[in-house]
Amino acid sequence: MAGFQYWKDDGFWIGFLDEWSDYVTQGTSLEDLKEHLKDLFKDLSLGKIPEARRHAELELA
């Protein structure tokens, strides 16, 4: 399971994965967006996008 952010803008659903917030995708519906996010997750987690920037949490004392 991966967290994601999404919103609707000018008729499209826009979103990104929490861990890779630099990589934004879109869909014509929320379900279409989720499919695009799944494809993006696969490409990013398999290293198919070189030098992908990741987001992580840092625990501070």
Image (spheres, helix red, strand yellow):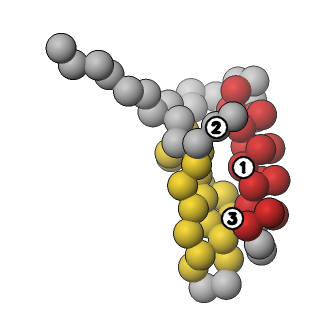
Q: Are circles 1 and 2 on residues that touch, CB within 8 Å?
A: yes
Q: Is residue 55 left or right of residue 9?
A: left
Q: In this view, does 10 lie above or below 31?
A: below
Q: Picture coordinates of residue 13 (x, y %)?
A: 66, 71
Mark 2 vs mark 3, foreground winner is: 2
Q: Choose top left, top right, bottom left or bottom right for residue 41.
A: top right
Identify the residue at horizontal 77%, vertical 72% (top origin): 29
Identify the residue at horizontal 77%, vertical 74% (top origin): 28
Q: Which of pointers 1 and 3 lies earlier in the amino acid sequence?
A: 3
Q: In this view, does 2 lie above or below 24?
A: above
Q: Name the residue under label 1.
A: 37
Q: Mark 3 points at which residue?
A: 26
The amino acid type of the residue labelled 1 equals Leu
Q: Which of pointers 1 and 2 lies earlier in the amino acid sequence?
A: 2
Q: Are circles 2 and 3 on residues that touch, CB within 8 Å?
A: no
The amino acid type of the residue labelled 2 equals Ala
Q: Name the residue under label 2.
A: 2
Label 2 element class: loop
Q: Choose top left, top right, bottom left or bottom right for residue 60.
A: top left
Is residue 23 visible in the rendered image? The answer is: no
Q: In this view, does 38 lie above or below 44?
A: below
Label 3 element class: strand
Q: Picture coordinates of residue 54 (x, y %)?
A: 50, 31
Identify the residue at horizontal 72%, vertical 49% (top origin): 37
Quarter of the image with the N terminus is: top right
